[in-house]
Image (tube, rainbow, N blue to C red):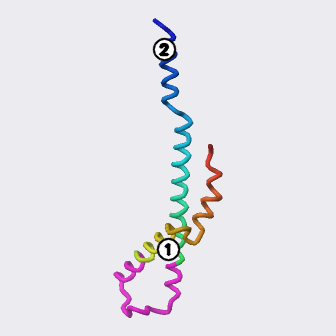
C-alpha cells in the first residue's frame, strides 16, 4: 500500500474542509443572531413603553366603548408598531447600542 496516496488524500480532505471558513461563517451567524436578539429586546422595550403611554391617556379619543376586543386590537397594534420601529433603521438606538456593546463579547 502506498502511503503517499493516503497522505495526499488527507491533505485534500483538510483543504476541502476549510476550518477557518467554518469559523467565519459561525461568527457571522452568531453576529446575525445577536443583532436579531438586540432588535427583539428593543421591540419588547418599545411595546412596554407604548402600553404605558397609552394607559396614561384619560380615556379613548376615537372610541368611547371600552371592551376586551378593543384591548386585544390595541395590544396587537402596539406590538406591530414596536417591531416595525425596532427594525426600521436604528429604531430608538437601544438595539444598536446593545449590539455594539455585546458583539465583542462573542468568543472567537
- In x, y percent, where is residue 42? 54, 67
The residue at 61%/49% (across/down) is 106
* Residue at image coords 40%, 92%: 62
Q: Quadrant of residue 67?
A: bottom left
Q: Which mark is residue 47?
A: 1
Tell me where residue 4 appears, x and y as whole percent: 51, 11
Outermost top residue: 1
Neighbourhood count class around disc 1 (C-alpha, 10 Å): few under 14, some 14–19, many 20 upward: many
Name the residue: 51% across, 54% down: 33
Mark 2 surroundings: few (<14), some (14-19) or many (≥20) residues within 10 A = few
State whether residue 57 appears in this view.
yes
Q: Which residues are magenta?
A: 50-75
The residue nearer to you, when weighing 79 against 19, is 19
> Which element type, helix, strand or loop, lies under badge 2?
helix
- Per the rendering, the mark at residue 66 is none
- Residue 43 appears anywhere in the view: no
Please say if 77 is above or below 66. above
Where is residue 24? Give x, y as percent: 55, 42
Q: Work out which quarter of the rendered image holds the N terminus and state it.
A: top left
The number of numbered discs placed on residues in the rendered structure image is 2
* For residue 4, above or below residue 85: above
Kindly state the secondary structure of the residue where label 1 is placed. Answer: helix
* Picture coordinates of residue 73, whole percent (x, y): 37, 79
Q: Which residue is mark 2?
A: 6
* Camera-nearest residue between 29 and 62: 29
* Viewer-closest of 50 and 25: 25
Amino acid at each position: 500500500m502506498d502511503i503517499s496516496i493516503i497522505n495526499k488524500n488527507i491533505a485534500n480532505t483538510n483543504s476541502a474542509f476549510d476550518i477557518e471558513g467554518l469559523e467565519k461563517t459561525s461568527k457571522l451567524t452568531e453576529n446575525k443572531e445577536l443583532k436579531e436578539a438586540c432588535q427583539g429586546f428593543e421591540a419588547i422595550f418599545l411595546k412596554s413603553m407604548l402600553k404605558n403611554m397609552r394607559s396614561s391617556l384619560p380615556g379613548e379619543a376615537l372610541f368611547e366603548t371600552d371592551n376586551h376586543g378593543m384591548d386585544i386590537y390595541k395590544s396587537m397594534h402596539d406590538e406591530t408598531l414596536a417591531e416595525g420601529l425596532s427594525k426600521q433603521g436604528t429604531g430608538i438606538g437601544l438595539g444598536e447600542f446593545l449590539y455594539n456593546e455585546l458583539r465583542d463579547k462573542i468568543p472567537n
